[in-house]
Amino acid sequence: MSLEQEIKLCVQQTDMLDLPMVSSIATLMQGKMQLNNLVSTYFDTLNLDLMQRGLGLRMRCCNGQWLQTVKTSGVVVNGLHQRDEWEHELASPNWNITKLMETALADSVSDSKVWDNVSELFTTDFIRHTIQLKLADGSDVELAYDRGEVRCGNSSEIIHEIELELKSGSVEQLKLLADQLCLQLPVSLSDISKAQQGYQLAQKCLNLASR
């Protein structure tokens, strides 16, 4: 288990940002920007039992590598998301139940009334540009710039955001970096995660289906 600490910034335009040209990024950038297509499927019951327990379950594929992830809802204040996270690399898109039992999802997996009804709920599909940053105080931050969409059935919504994840160092310095980017770019602090965005879309789809 690890504690994920990141600040989310919602991009308030449709055009792509040219982040390496932003001064507060260019001076801190370590190495080259990386590019990946991330496709993630989120799972829950139709009654949203996992969400109601404050848990998220995701299977992600990146360059042929599968990643099984469990997250708690955690705490979100002014764009800063802090939550417990369990990630395990897998050789296939099949659940590793043993690893799931080592997470906060254990009670849900053990409850057959819940686990037997867990299925695909929504999918996120986006291009991620990743930049490693070294802050002045030595803190390490991973900047992820994501553009794509979240899909549920025939419905979809746009994903266009920046994530600033603290890999090591000071949360206060992470906040200062976020404040700088808010001044230099058309972005604003966001308390809504991709999972929350997907759940909101899924609830709309489920409500329509029940009519």
Image (cartoon, rainbow, N blue to C red):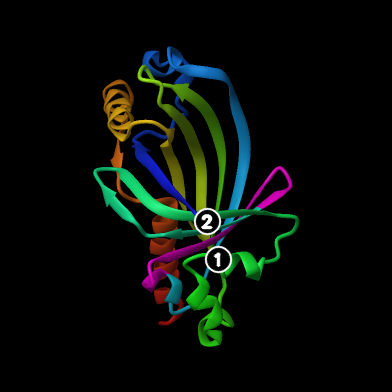
Front residue of 11 and 51 = 51
- Give the vertical position of 183 relative to 120 (above or below): above
Residue at 46% from the left image edge and 58% from the top image edge: 71
Q: Which residues are magenta?
A: 51-66
Name the residue that disc number 2 marks.
Answer: 86
Inspect this view and state whether residue 159 appears: yes
Does the image show residue 45? no
- Magenta residue check for 63: yes
| Residue at x 28% of width, y 32% of height | 175
What residue is drawn where x is 52% and y is 56%? Answer: 86
Q: In the figure, 67 relative to 26: above or below? A: below
Where, quadrant-wise, is the C terminus in this rendering? bottom left
Camera-near label (1 vs 2) is 1
Tell which residue pokes out farthest to the left in this image.
Answer: 78
In the rendered image, which residue does mark 1 sit on?
A: 102
Is mark 1 in CB contact (under 8 Å) with mark 2?
yes
Measure how far apart labels 1 and 2 are at the Cα level: 9 Å
For this rendering, which residue is in front, 91 or 22? 91
Dot 1 crowding, Cα within 10 Å, few <14, some 14–19, many 20+: few
Q: Is residue 159 left or right of residue 79?
A: right
Q: Is residue 76 magenta?
A: no
Looking at the image, residue 195 lies above or below residue 166:
below
Q: Residues within 10 Å of mark 2 (few under 14, many from 20)?
A: many
